[in-house]
Image (tube, rainbow, N blue to C red):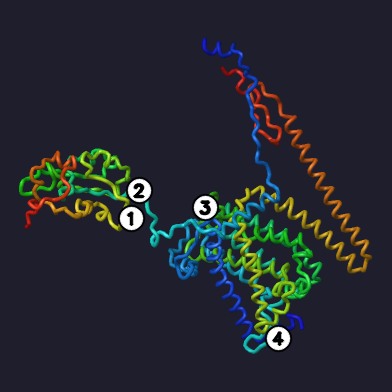
Amino acid sequence: MTTAELIGGDPGWLITVKALLVFIFCVVLTLLSVWGERRLVGRMQQRPGPNRVGPFGLIQALADGVKLALKEDIIPAAADKIVFILAPIISATACFMSFAVIPISGPVTLFGHKTAMQLTDLPIGVLYVLAIASVGVYGIILAGWSSGSTYPLLGGLRSSAQVISYEIAMGLSLVAVFIYAGSMSTSDIVAAQSSTWYAIVLFPSFVIYAISMVGETNRAPFDLAEAEGELVGGFHTEYSSLKFALFFLAEYVNIIAVSALATTLFLGGYHAPPFLGFTENWLGGWFTAIWFFSKVLVFFFVFVWLRGTLPRLRYDQFMQFGWKILIPVSIVWILVVATLRVLSLQGAPRLVVVAFASAVVLLVMLVNIGFDSAKKKKMASIIDDAPAPSFAVPELPMNISSINVSAPNKGVDRG
Amino acid sequence: MAEIESFKNSDKDLQKVEFTQVDQPGSVGFFGHAKGFWVTFSTIFKKPETVEYPEVKAPTQERFHGRHQLNRHPDGLEKCIGCELCAWACPADAIYVEGANNTEENRMSPGERYGKVYQINYLRCVFCGLCIEACPTRALTMTNEYELADDSREKLIFEKEDLLGPLRAGMLMPPHPMYPDMTDTNYYKGDVTQAHPSQDVNK
């Protein structure tokens, strides 16, 4: 019995209960992850992090939330009032919605009813998640535009440009998964990974997805939109009180959502790691949810680790990385995967598959060598072409690719 | 002009400037990046450097500039002579002193004068210690106490009684007469080591 059939028979009250559970799960996990992130980043910087409110500072995030809720709610005079209020609502709603199709556990019994912890199982579940993520961008750009202020506008534009660019790479990285699983439904993709995880089979896709999900969630090192030193606070500069809290919530739920999607698509979802398959029946099947959460938490840890380690990218570097590296690489990778898949589906002899694979590897190496030599040639030409100025200038170091030499007529008649 | 001419005619070659090549950092390889990640990861397991302040109070340096203190002679008389040098030395104008004459009935310090009013405004004080350098009798010194925050301007103007050091063993609460047969010079030299029974006027 597939998950779709399993949860298809859910009565209305059970669907409501599950929706409520998903919502509570998201909010609680957000509060805990804010706390966890601050503690972890603190430890990475050799300080303890929040440890005052509650045991180990556990309810620090809750206290912050209460504080935010009690703050004065300011709507700037220049703001477009309706859109200004609508934007955080769109943002927060969109990120919760993507959780509807994430399978959190295998078959379990909930209130005496046999079901699975997944709100709904769309045949195009992953596309739905991508679509919802795109709707979330409206929240960002509308917030930036409606604030009636320069910094939020710039931040909003940056954010939306960033999210849209990385969504392309993200979408492309998922294509390989669709090709292998033969389905776009999240539960089918999880079922297809019961033997091997796609993170291993489709490793390049996994890497591209992992990178683009950081870009997609506006997180460090890709947090240029909220660059504190440059844009004050990005698109939410003018927001305060609960509206700001909604954006904050949206950011963290988004992180958990993309982590959950990565778990579902690449790390076998709620399935146990290899050789631990017997644990899946523990606690009447609920143990699968624990596996799911631990995988999500691993992703969350990586998010925090990145933030603690890497400096923020420059905007043009970031865009170049997205458009000139991630997207072309994923397109080439899709071509390779598709060819391999067709070859194996049509029962081509093993020799052909191996030959194709090695040809691809050889081609990649050749391209790489070509790029390297072109780079060297370019560097050499820059140094040769520089005109000798007529005034005293230190000799050029040979391993600097470009140097700013001022116009030759300057400083001729000095002294 | 002559100087410039001589510079031009010197054998220094202006076209050639000494240049030492410096290694450019360049791009970091894959393992260079991995090293950075290892730094943050391994730091998680190190002991944090944080001092949990209100619970744990790390001792200050020995000569930390904290709250001021007005000292006493070993018999309990005040050292301050109300000369106002501290107030004059203060760059932030944080000290206010009013001197008054000592009398036989009311003697607060050895010698002629004593500080009648002594105020330090801790909203102004920058803890530079110039007042301590200016004090001719070592009446004014600084303690290591740094917890000076309060909730009103009035509370942060410390009066003489807030600043005076405590009465230690062998000291008597002034006003009381000077040690018998001692002058203010003796006091200054440190000849008085504790109060004499005859100084206790309340007995």
| Label 4 secondary element | loop
Q: Are dots 4 and 1 on a single chain?
A: no
Mark 2 chain = B
Q: Which amino acid, by three-letter code, is at mark 3? A: Val
Task: Please name which of the two marks, 2 or 1, marks the residue nearer to the observer.
Answer: 2
Q: Residues within 10 Å of mark 2 (few under 14, many from 20)?
A: few
Q: Which amino acid, by three-letter code, is at mark 2? A: Glu
Residue drawn at (68%, 85%) of the image = A10
First along the sequence among labels 4 and 3 = 4
Task: Please name which of the two marks, 4 or 1, marks the residue nearer to the observer.
Answer: 1
Comparing A211 with B35, the one in front is: B35
Q: Which residue is mark 2?
A: B62
First along the sequence among labels 2 and 1 = 2
Q: CA distance from mark 1 to mark 3?
A: 34 Å
Q: Which residue is mark 4?
A: A9
Q: CA distance from mark 2 to mark 3?
A: 42 Å
Q: Which residue is mark 3?
A: A232
| Label 3 secondary element | loop
Inspect this view and state whether residue A13 appears: yes
Image x and y of residue A113, in percent: 66, 88
A70 with respect to A123 (left or right): left
Inspect this view and state whether residue B81 appears: no
